[in-house]
């Protein structure tokens, strides 16, 4: 049983926080404005939610706000490696190995914008949510924590782990104000849905105009460290058509957003007026063939994977923009990782193999009648979901649906009310409730971290079947939606194959073209899953949105996470096993285009997933 200190309230601080204001947007005091400097940034959207720890909220805007408004123990540097954020921390180091213990020292003056100290309470709040809530980013490391102890008035945090954890630096980024959120209506699932109750960074939100698509951030006057050089940062919703004109006229001085091929061409037309660079996002767009329903049958799942044209899915999502050069052909490492190399096997899912798919479906008892695959008179029907209209997921899902329908498979489009509902209920591990529609296929972001072992465990690891603290959703599960635990079923529309078509989708030779030469050069034939590993005697279940759990692979995942096995050895086993399972088909890593006008200085970008907004405290407008 995990233990937590019960005296946090008295240990955190000698000064109680002031009363919480009722305004939906936290404000900070600021001096009378004279001539305020401002930098306007074009972004894809300013819509919420804004919780950086929720899979549903992953976006450039969420990352931007987290970087500018929330404190983190470590942040990625220009080389992608995590470095201690000394604006928040005095130190963070391993102080014991048996049990493995990390001690964090928080700067005494570090506080939220309402005056409450940033302290152990905030560490505990994040830890509890990350190990118990569904749909979170990077839960595996938090599940190794066995105890958190406060000291020095809550400004020292001693974290004890049940096992060694080399990836401990990935924990406790983007801390949240526990004193305002832990008892807030709706709980974790409503946290940062449309606003921030307090800030622990150099900026603070002062206004949000959803209709105009504009969010204004001003210097946080309660920030204890170096103040932001610029008075205001304005995030403005834009699109490729309006972006070039906004940069040319000076309406926007900076842009960080997804661009397609034509958008890039127009930006290049600005020539010397803007400097262009790329910023990869910390996740990979992936197709999940979840082992539930019909796809729980390995033959059927393999057949569906063999029908997919991965090249066409990538083309639909990347649209010829910078993301097209970041094809993801490994299960764990992203293309931006300096140690990335393709591991994708020959054949499916590299290329579609319709003849192989037809063979597998017939072996599974299906036959094709009037253009549709049926078994016992019932069509093969699969439920497909993506995070609403969010791009690039919606475009990939549309292309995927078209491919399956053309191949003779009926597709039902699952349409939850929100992206959070998708992850909190319909993709959550465990029973999603009697009213939930099972999701067979999902097009979603798969997060990657600075520690690939943590990525492996969070994306593909198992959890003990009886563990209530590992993100399980179920009937009456309070805390998944902050209300009663109930959820209205998602709406669904069905797309059926052309019943007049008949015959096989493709009787010709299997496709062998369309994938990059680098993939062919760097990968080899898929091998079978590792054999000879005894499954754990304890019953295991999935602990990820893919619904995947392989007890024979789990020991390798755990050994990589705890450092008992070198990561390269673990990946040598895990990569071919994951490709063979056919549950996750990675497509590409989204890449933002960063366009900086000649009038702005201090914007730092990297080929690694290092948010350019991290440098916002140093942004300045060039005089003259």
Image (spheres, helix red, strand yellow):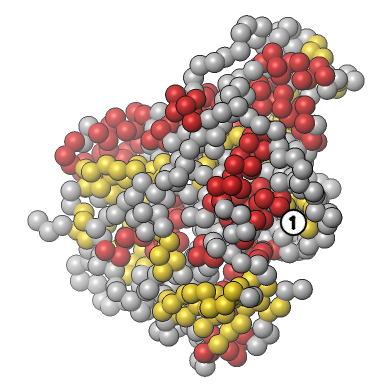
> What residue is at 90 percent from the left and 20 percent from the top?
376
From the viewer's perspective, tell me whether residue 262 is left or right of residue 494: left
From the viewer's perspective, tell me whether residue 32 is left or right of residue 66: left
Residue 439 appears in which quarter of the rendering? top right
> What residue is at 50 percent from the left and 77 percent from the top?
104
> What residue is at 36 percent from the left and 76 percent from the top?
223
From the viewer's perspective, tell me whether residue 200 is left or right of residue 562: left
Q: Position of residue 498 (x, y in %)?
A: 70, 13
Q: Position of residue 424 (x, y in %)?
A: 68, 53
Residue 465 appears in which quarter of the rendering? bottom right
Q: Position of residue 156 (x, y in %)?
A: 51, 83
> What residue is at 44 percent from the left and 66 percent from the top?
74
Q: Identify residue for label 1.
A: 463
From the viewer's perspective, tell me whether residue 445 is left or right of residue 424: left
Q: Nearer the viewer, residue 178 or 547?
A: 547
Task: Using the image, determine if residue 613 lies above or below residue 409.
Answer: below
Q: Position of residue 342 (x, y in %)?
A: 50, 34
Whether residue 288 is visible, yes or no, is: no
Q: Secondary structure at mark 1?
A: strand
Whether residue 105 is visible, yes or no, is: yes
């Amino acid at each position: 049983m995990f233990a937590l200190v019960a005296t946090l309230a008295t240990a955190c601080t000698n000064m109680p926080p002031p009363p919480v204001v009722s305004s939906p947007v936290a404000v900070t005091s600021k001096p009378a404005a004279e001539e305020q400097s401002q930098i306007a940034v074009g972004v894809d959207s300013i819509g919420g939610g804004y919780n950086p720890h929720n899979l549903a909220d992953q976006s450039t805007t969420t990352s931007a706000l987290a970087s500018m408004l929330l404190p983190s123990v470590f942040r990625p540097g220009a080389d992608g490696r995590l470095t201690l954020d000394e604006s928040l921390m005095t130190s963070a180091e391993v102080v014991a190995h048996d049990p493995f213990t990390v001690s964090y020292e928080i700067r005494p003056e570090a506080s939220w914008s309402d005056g409450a100290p940033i302290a152990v309470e905030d560490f505990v709040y994040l830890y509890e949510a990350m190990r118990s809530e569904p749909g979170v980013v990077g839960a595996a490391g938090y599940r190794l924590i066995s105890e958190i102890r406060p000291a020095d008035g809550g400004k020292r945090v001693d974290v004890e782990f049940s096992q060694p954890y080399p990836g401990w630096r990935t924990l406790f980024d983007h801390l949240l104000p526990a004193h305002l959120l832990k008892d807030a209506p709706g709980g974790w699932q409503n946290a940062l849905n449309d606003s921030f109750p307090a800030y622990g960074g150099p900026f603070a939100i002062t206004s949000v105009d959803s209709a105009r698509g504009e969010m204004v951030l001003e210097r946080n006057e309660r920030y204890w460290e170096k103040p932001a050089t610029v008075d205001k940062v304005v995030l403005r919703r834009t699109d490729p058509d309006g972006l070039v004109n906004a940069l040319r006229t000076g309406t926007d001085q900076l842009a960080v957003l997804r661009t397609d091929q034509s958008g890039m061409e127009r930006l290049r037309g600005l020539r010397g007026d803007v400097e262009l660079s790329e910023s990869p996002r910390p996740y990979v767009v992936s197709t999940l063939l979840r082992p539930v329903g019909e796809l729980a049958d390995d033959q059927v799942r393999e057949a569906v994977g063999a029908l997919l044209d991965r090249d066409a899915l990538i083309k639909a999502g990347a649209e010829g923009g910078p993301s097209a050069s970041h094809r993801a052909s490994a299960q764990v490492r992203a293309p931006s990782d300096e140690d990335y190399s393709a591991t994708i096997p020959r054949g499916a899912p590299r290329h579609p193999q319709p003849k192989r798919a037809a063979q597998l479906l017939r072996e599974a008892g299906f036959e094709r009648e009037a253009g549709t695959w049926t078994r016992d008179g019932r069509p093969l029907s699969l439920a497909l979901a993506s995070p609403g209209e969010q791009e690039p997921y919606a475009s990939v899902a549309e292309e995927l649906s078209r491919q399956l329908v053309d191949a003779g498979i009926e597709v039902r489009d699952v349409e939850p009310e929100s992206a959070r509902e998708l992850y909190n209920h319909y993709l959550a591990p465990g029973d999603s409730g009697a009213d939930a529609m099972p999701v067979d296929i999902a097009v979603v972001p798969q997060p990657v971290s600075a520690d690939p072992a943590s990525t492996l465990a969070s994306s593909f690891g198992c959890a003990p079947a009886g563990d209530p603290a590992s993100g399980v959703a179920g009937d009456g599960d309070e805390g998944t939606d902050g209300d009663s635990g109930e959820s209205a079923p998602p709406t669904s529309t069905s797309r059926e194959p052309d019943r007049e078509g008949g015959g096989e989708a493709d009787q010709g030779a299997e496709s062998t073209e369309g994938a990059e030469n680098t993939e062919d050069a760097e990968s080899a034939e898929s091998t079978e899953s590792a054999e000879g590993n005894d499954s754990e005697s304890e019953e295991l279940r999935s602990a990820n949105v893919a619904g995947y759990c392989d007890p024979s692979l789990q020991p390798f995942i755990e050994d990589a996470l705890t450092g008992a096995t070198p990561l390269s050895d673990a990946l040598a086993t895990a990569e071919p096993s994951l490709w063979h399972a056919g549950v996750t088909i990675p497509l590409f890593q989204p890449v933002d285009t960063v366009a900086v006008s000649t009038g702005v200085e201090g914007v730092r970008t990297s080929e690694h997933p290092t948010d350019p907004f991290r440098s916002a405290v140093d942004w300045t407008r060039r005089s003259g």
